[in-house]
Amino acid sequence: MKRFLLKIGIFVVVVVSAAFFHYRHYDLDGMKERRHSYLIQPQNNSEVHVGVIWPLNQEYPGYLKGLKMALEELQNNQAFPRFKVHFAHEDKSKSAAWSFARDQRIVAVVGSANSDTSKRIAPLLDDAGILFLQSSTNPFLMKRKIKLLLENSSPDFYHAENIKNIVRYLNIDKISFIYKKSEYFKGLRHLLAYQVKNEPDIKITSIYSFDEQFKVEEIYSAIDTRDFDGIVFLGYKKETQDFLKYLRWCKNDKPFIGGELLDYPDFYNSIDPETMKGVYCSSYDSHFDKTPELQEFYQRYQQKYNLKPNNYALRGYCAIMLLKKAVDNSPNLRPNLLHHSILYSKFSILGLKFEYSHDGILKQNLTACKKWLPGEGFVQFTPDVESKSKLKYNYELFE
């Protein structure tokens, strides 16, 4: 009798679960249909409702500042239709995505600083018929056949190439490669491996990955048994700081190369300058001089906030302005039309062309190679990777 009741219970659970997942998909279809019906009505096209998913703290403040600056400019110019923005914290991205999906007025969601967040919410937004203009840089996210997904930042193709060029510039023959097991760093690891594969003079002699259990001594002991001329380390701020400090404490002064997360004063100002010698990174172009319009943006932003804009500020500004151009070039606010307009129109924002591949990868390169200099922080430079001379690594060359 007990076995029979157990089988009945399992059957009920399976049926209820199947019904739940069916309803969930049906519900998303219903949200998509209601959004479509709402947005094709002319009277509902006077306001553009946009969701923003971003860390609402001081970690990446530039994005929200740039976004708000764009909104104010549109308002001051009495642009029509008007933009209405709904903010949500990235830590609650899944519930925020559901909230936006249920709101038939929402035509687009912008932001997401984290690749893991983008991967999690992109399918949901797509099923609900919402354009997702995402700011994370992992191009592998774009390969998942999500129809309404577009990038709003230079993809990691360029960062991988920059790291390779730094390695060639320093004449590093053997790399010890360490990375965190996250969506962002795993993607960058694959891209870098691809770049190095085409360089016969560069070999990755050891690869070490870590998860949340980051053990500095264990990692260093593992790579110290292998021969290497430099280290490529892809991790978040605290992990990178801890490893770099331990590396220098072990009297290892070999070149240390990382990603754009190193290029922040709160990273390098909290480390002894001697520890930072020989540190390089691929980050973003901080000159803002590629076009006259970009130079003007730099000045307006600095005057408004008394701060220099960074890549995040530019992304936030461009996200709103891209949507505005798409709205102006579409017969109504249906997200699929906005997506098509951005994908194929090659819009120009601040003199920068937003040209996309067919799967939504932004071709624009605003990245840069950087080296750390005492008293200056990370400074842009152009590696002379075509040089045939064998440059010996020497700190004095960069001071």
Image (cartoon, grey):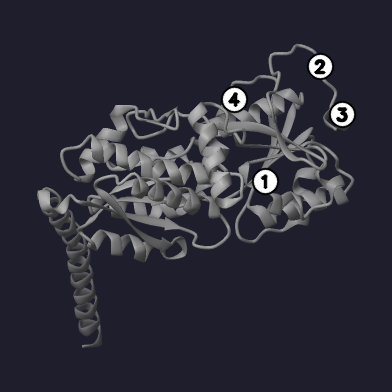
- Vertical arrangement, residue 186 with respect to residue 124, above or below: above
* Of marks 3 and 2, the one in the foreground: 3
Q: Is mark 1 on a helix, strand or loop?
A: helix
Vertical arrangement, residue 305 with respect to residue 200, above or below: below
Check disc 3 and report the residue beneath it.
394
Q: Considering only order in the chain, which callout, 1 or 2, is on the residue closer to the N terminus?
A: 1
Q: Which amino acid does label 1 sit on?
A: Leu
Callouts 2 and 4 close, C-beta under 8 Å: no
Residue 189: percent from left, percent from top: 57, 39
Give the numbered dot on residue 197: 4
- CA distance for labels 4 and 3: 27 Å
Q: Say left or right for 27 vs 367.
A: left
Q: Furthest residue to the top?
A: 388
Pick the quarter of the image with the N terminus: bottom left
Estimate the spatial distance between the alpha carbons at disc 2 and disc 4, rounded to whole Å.
Answer: 21 Å
In the figure, is residue 152 to the left or right of 299? left
Say whether disc 3 or disc 1 marks the residue closer to the N-terminus. 1
Q: Which residue is drawn at 45% across and 49% down?
A: 69
Q: Mark 1 points at which residue?
A: 262
Q: Specify which label sits upstream in the sequence, 4 or 1.
A: 4
Front in this rendered view, residue 161 or 382: 382
Q: Where is residue 224 in the image (x, y as percent from the top left)?
A: 80, 44
Task: For label 4, count other residues whose C-alpha is less than 10 Å away and answer few (under 14), some (14-19) or many (20+).
Answer: few
Say which amino acid is labelled 4.
Lys
Q: What residue type is labelled 3?
A: Asn
Disc 1: CA contacts within 10 A as few (<14), some (14-19) or many (>=20) = many
Q: Compute the Cα span from label 3 to label 2.
A: 12 Å
Query: Quick one: label 2, few (<14), some, or many (20+) residues within 10 Å?
Result: few
Residue beneath disc 2:
390
Quadrant in which the C terminus appears? top right
Viewer-side residue, 173 vs 345: 345
